[in-house]
Amino acid sequence: MSGNSTYQPQSKVLQWFEKRLPIGGLIHSSFVAYPTPRNLNYWWTFGGILSMMLGIQIVTGIVLAMHYTPHVDLAFKSVEAIMRDVNYGWLLRYLHANGAAMFFLAVYIHMFRGIYYGSYKEPREVLWILGVIIYLLMMATGFMGYVLVWGQMSFWAATVITNLFSAIPGVGDTIVTWLWGGYAVGNPTLNRFYSLHYLLPFVIAGVVILHVWALHVAGQNNPTGIEPKSERDTVPFTPYATVKDGFFMACFLILYCWFVFYVPNFLGHPDNYIPANPAVTPAEIVPEWYYLPFYAILRSIPDKLLGVVALFGSILILAFLPWLDTSHVKSGRYRPLFKQFFWLWVIVCIGLGWLGSKPPEGIYVIMSRLFTLYYFAFFIVILPLLGIFEKTKPLPNSISESVLGAKA
Amino acid sequence: MTTVSSAEHTRRDFLYIATGAVGAVGAAAALVPLIAQMNPDASTIAAGAPIDVDLAPIADGQIIKVFWRSKPIFISHRTKKEIDEAKNVALASLPDPEPDSERVKAGHDQWLVVIGICTHLGCIPLAHQGEFDGWFCPCHGSQYDTAGRIRKGPAPKNLPLPPYKFVSDTKIQIG
Ligand code: HEM
Ligand code: FES
């Protein structure tokens, strides 16, 4: 949130205020005068969309919390009461449940964008790692929110996910008992998940502020991956980025509303409308779609500890990306080989998601193993080697040259 | 502002170190209740008292489920065939080798009492299913035999045995 502030409020009152707390100048320099590369495409609008989704989750969440009861005997009933009795309760809950899914959709697009254009590379490593932290917090928040409903899927998801920690040698079982506050998932577990589900979105909001701060120190990356060199390479945030972001936010909201109003349960699992029953595990348990790729990785490995290590490793490896990718060229646009491996990797990620929803048998297991192998190979083998062997295309001299042609 | 620096140790240095030390101890002490409050509370522990189970109504070949410490306990009244299957397997071929005699109480071969929680990630396996006549876990496909031993799938260990004893020939106490 740097940048030289040219902010000069007109009114005397605002001038008086600005002298005492220069917040107007901060906003002006961060979101009005802030120079953005002139060649940003629509893939750059997802940061704004993500902030909007966080806001929507917090607002709908706070009002849901006014009607929700975190107790094993009442949680499921209170969610049903939200659906049937509370004024517009059905809308608020569908907005929140589908909002989580849209939030993840946006974060995945945002991350794929970052990887394709090399946005994690110098000088944006810290910015990238803050993003990975936000993503981890989102996963924890979404998981705990899903448990709050206290349906069959909630209960068994809570059981399976907390049991991941039992794989830790020696202290695993002690940790799991501590997480549960009992000898199985139960009321203490539900109660603490509620407390944390309420808290974590605000922690996310805090990390988002750091993320945007780091962004405004390093400046935005852009489709060419070369840094702005002169004023001709940038345009002011307002109106250019504001309008572009706003337009795509509206498009995104239409998709979101389509889910909410036409297929509100499409992304959910019907078994979660059965109250939690600690005595019976449902015939098939699957997580929400946004966790499926990691679930497939977990199941592809026939060893408990290694499976859990691979699951967490597949997420944590993202934090090391800035150092695994050895290429000096940022943008995939000028990296012909990288481009192919990247798209294959995207297909593998989506394929793993599909496999995570299939029963772990026969051909599905074999495919999961191959896909898991490629997932990791992309980071550990392909990216380090590509930087050394790949022959990249020539870069334009500047952003404006790439947009306007060499003679400009 | 000017700061006076002296090579000598001052009283401020002493205060600095002493305050830091007390602060560190205080912070560590504060962590104890903050962490301990998440462990099972007194009522949860009290609810884990032993329970008695009457075995008489359980028919030959039947498996029942009871709850102890909010964990499901499988009590299997094994048939002759099931006992033989459990005994006649080559121990070396098991992922977690344990002879059948260590899975049951001496003289009570027909009664298998195990905690019904899959040792993989905690689902409840389904009885009388899978390739080994024992249990099949629907979550990630682990299979257990008639002695509750893991035979196939991602689970690393046999179904654990709860602490229990026979109070009479037809009654056990779990816990
Ligand atoms: C990062 C932002 C958030 C995410 C990703 C998220 C995610 C979720 C998810 C996936 C569910 C389960 C929805 C369902 O299947 O019904 C849920 C439920 C819930 N969430 Fe959130 N949430 C967020 C923020 C919040 C906040 C800030 C609050 C409260 C202040 C909140 C309160 C609740 C409540 C009370 C429920 C249970 C009622 C229901 O099932 O709709 N959430 N959340
Ligand atoms: S929990 Fe039983 S196989 Fe995973």
Image (spheres, rainbow, N blue to C red):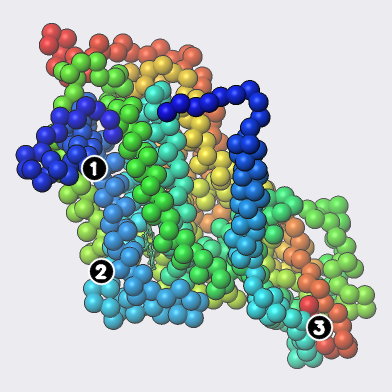
* Residue A38 position within the rendered picture, expressed as x and y whole percent measured from the top left: 18, 25
* Chain under numbered label 3: B
**Residue visible at 36% across and 28% down?**
A119
Callouts 3 and 1 on one subunit = no
The 10 Å Cα crowd at callout 3, few under 14, some 14 to 19, many 20 or more, is some
Confirm or deny contact between disc 2 and disc 3 (CB under 8 A): no
Q: What residue type is labelled 1?
A: Leu
**Residue visible at 85% across and 60% down?**
B98
The 10 Å Cα crowd at callout 1, few under 14, some 14 to 19, many 20 or more, is few
**Residue visible at 32% across and 52% down?**
A54
The answer to whether mark 3 is within 8 Å of ligand 2 is no
* Chain under numbered label 1: A
Distance of mark 2 from mark 1, alpha carbons?
Answer: 39 Å
**Residue visible at 14% across and 43% down?**
A16
Q: What element carries label 3?
A: strand
The 10 Å Cα crowd at callout 2, few under 14, some 14 to 19, many 20 or more, is some
Residue that label 3 marks: B173
Residue that label 2 marks: A91
Residue that label 1 marks: A21
Q: What element carries label 1?
A: loop
